[in-house]
Amino acid sequence: MLKELQIRNFALIDELELGFEPGLNVITGETGAGKTILMAALELAVGGKASAEVIRTGEEEATIEAVFEVAGETAHARLADSGFEAPGRELLVRRALARSSRNRIHLNGTLATLAVLEAIGDSLIRVYGQHEHHTLRQSETHLGLLDAFADHADLLEGMRKRFAAHHDLAERLRRVLAGKETARARAEMLRFQLKEIGDAALTPGEEEELRQERQVLSAAEKLAEAARFGEHALYAGESAAASTVRKLSARLGELVDTDPRLGEIAKLVDEAYTLVEEAGWRLREYAEKLVFDPERLEEVDNRLVDLAKLKRKYGDSVDAILALRESALRELADLDLGEEGQAALEAEAAAAEKAAREAAATLSKSRRTAAKRLEGRVRGELGELGMKDARFEARFADETTLSVAGFDAVEFYFSANAGEEPRALARIASGGELSRIMLALKTLATTDAPGKTLIFDEVDAGIGGAVADVVGARLRLLGERFQVLCITHLPQIAAYGSTHYRIEKSIRGGRTSTTVARIDGPERETEIARMMGGAAVTASVLAGAREMIQAKAKANERRKRN
């Protein structure tokens, strides 16, 4: 859940601090007031691509800080996998964009990469913008939505593992069954590679250790000189720090009885003497062990040259070369199989394919059962979203090639009007219909962890009237499981918000600025009235706005009681 957002020097925003609440948070404002800017800042906070063009004119740096309450095990696991923690279940993301230096990302005060933020951000926020609705036009996304509705995570993981085993064994068998001449030539090449890599006697991490050793050997004289200087300054010299600190310690010891307040200071000085003395000893030991060895330096250089040659041929690192060696050993073992070994491999490959097909069949059966449930549920949702005559179907294509997702291909079919046969959703649905279908699917099929932040950017595109009222009710209902942020132009949706923010653009001191403020009471009534009647907010429009807010609150209470 997004708890706090702070933005500085970002596009038209000078400085902005917002606190968000659980439930349905609605964001409203005039067209062009800056809602797109707010969305862009939120996307950057969870790993969106950055550009220096968003830095406010006249400023050198823009910053975005977001505090999240981390919900769900997925987010915690991704944080842990990336080496980060969220004490108290809170995560502070800070992203700084600069004109003249590198951009910086910090997670709970620790420097992080964009790749880490992207991996974590997906488990914190999900954005359903207008473009998201249009992904329904891509039929390849339909299978994923069906799997989400059916909660197929375990079946999909089992399918993935069985397909991987089948694919690996099938590839091994293919190589074994290749022409004998090709197999012999391949085996000879593998033996040559294995001998060359084996003769090199590589060890994991060797290159990094050699580079570090070379760095020390190259600077041995400077390092030794610095160590001897340090020993002299701290311990061995005539005016060494240790001697001076020891004298001070003795004098303070004599004066403690006179003024006990010096006791703590005397202890600190004693500790300082011990530390300075030990540092001096260690520097002397370091200097004595440090030897400039030109022959060893030459050996290291030659070894690094040899490693570079191997890397050009076999991989971009020692670890990659060693991995290639293991792969070559397995492949050579396959090529050297006798008839008995080949038969055993064929049996193993056949068993793996059978297991993969059985897993695909189980997954397919579950999908077909779930598809019937999904069709009924989506039709019900669409009926309440103003499309009472709508028909929705999930149609399966004939069995396709076995893949990591099984062998199903699914496409959604849709008809908005009575008497019309459903046709491929990707080709016939309008933008407004797509937005409602996507809302219905996400309400039914979301697999996000409770408490996650879902952002709906202008989900009201192409709708109005009673339909908008039902969309607002659905978003409010969704807000009981998730934190929902909804940017809307419709008063029917805004009135359902449990928290309301107004975004405005103004000119101050000759500069345009965007501000966002939380509103309630009379201010909220005025904003809803503006959305209902435009610039002229009359007493009757204001009364209508007040009545609308109260009616939505009562409707929500009745639904909870029932």
Image: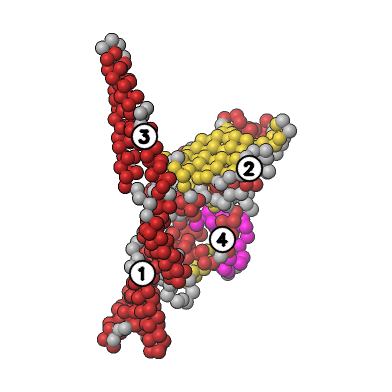
Q: Which structural element holds mark 1?
A: helix
Secondary structure mostly seen in magenta is helix
Q: Which residue is mark 3?
A: 232
Determine the residue positioned at 39% across, 57% down.
294
Q: Amino acid at mark 3?
A: His
Across and down, in percent, residue 546 comes to 59, 33
Give the magenta part as a residue range: 422-441
Which quarter of the figure has residue 57?
Answer: top right
Q: Residues within 10 Å of mark 3 (few under 14, many from 20)?
A: some
Above or below, 167 against 546 in this view is: below
- Viewer-closest of 252 and 408: 252
Determine the residue positioned at 37% across, 39% down.
228
Decide if residue 113 is on the left or right side of residue 174: right
Residue 333 visible? The answer is yes
N-terminal of the two: label 4 or label 2? 2
Query: Which of labels 4 and 2 is toward the front?
Result: 2
- Point out the residue furthest to the right here: 510
Which quarter of the figure has residue 181?
Answer: bottom left
